[in-house]
Image (cartoon, rainbow, N blue to C red):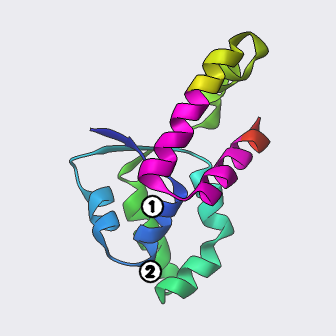
Amino acid sequence: MKLVIDTNRLAAALIKSSVTREIILSDKFDLYSPDYILTEIDKNRDFLIKKAKITKKEFEEILLTLLNHIHLIPFEEFESKLRFYLESTNKNKSIEIAERGYQHLLKFHTTEKRVKYMLSKLQEKL
């Protein structure tokens, strides 16, 4: 099964050995993430190390192990598709897709505040 993993799930797996870490390390899933997940992890590296109560070396080892199970997709590979749906000629379809995605995130993954934050970060990339 193909799944997209966000920074929060990777951060959770870095902080402690948990179900999230087991899922990432499992061969049952093909996990994908935009490559900017690395930037987000790097920005929070010190916080994550402190929260996990591990050394920098241990952090790097865990991170590399987890990343070996995640397909990192360069932003450029999906940027054109994203731009296509954000163009005014595709506005109705874009709104429909965004609304479905927004409702899915709210229902299954995260809080409304986090969804708004993630969407704002995506807009910054464009």
Q: Residue at x 62, y 80 (%)?
A: 47
The answer to whether residue 44 shows anywhere in this view is yes
Q: Residue at x 68, y 67 (%)?
A: 43
Asked if residue 17 is positioned above or below residue 107 in the image, the reply reads: below
Q: Which picture quadrant has residue 49?
A: bottom right
User: How far from the left and from the top, in percent, is residue 58?
Assistant: 44, 80
Between residue 88 and residue 65, name the one nearer to us: 88
Residue 88: where, in percent of width, then height? 78, 15
User: Which residue, given by chain and number where applicable, does mark 1 sit on?
Assistant: 9
**Which quadrant of the view contains residue 15?**
bottom left
Q: Tell me the element at label 1.
A: helix
On screen, residue 122 versus residue 7, left or right, reads: right
**Front-most of residues 117 and 106:** 106
The reply to whether the magenta stretch includes residue 76 is: no
Left or right of residue 75: residue 91:
right
Residue at 74% from the left image edge and 9% from the top image edge: 89
Disc 2 residue type (three-letter): Glu
Residue 104 in the image, given as x and y percentages of width and height: 47, 42
Instruction: Name the residue rendered at 59%, 64% in the picture.
Output: 41
Q: Is residue 70 above or below residue 96?
A: below
Q: Is residue 99 magenta?
A: yes
Closest to the camera, between mark 1 and mark 2, is 1
Between 102 and 42, which is closer to the camera in this rendering? 102
Segment tinted magenta in the rendering: 97-122
The answer to the question of whether label 1 and label 2 lie on touching residues, with beta carbons closer than 8 A, is no
Callout 2: helix, strand or loop?
helix
Q: Amino acid at mark 1?
A: Arg
Q: Disc 1 and disc 2: Cα gap in Å?
A: 18 Å
Which quarter shows the C terminus?
top right
| Residue occupied by mark 2 | 58
> Relative to 73, does residue 10 appear above or below in the rendering?
below
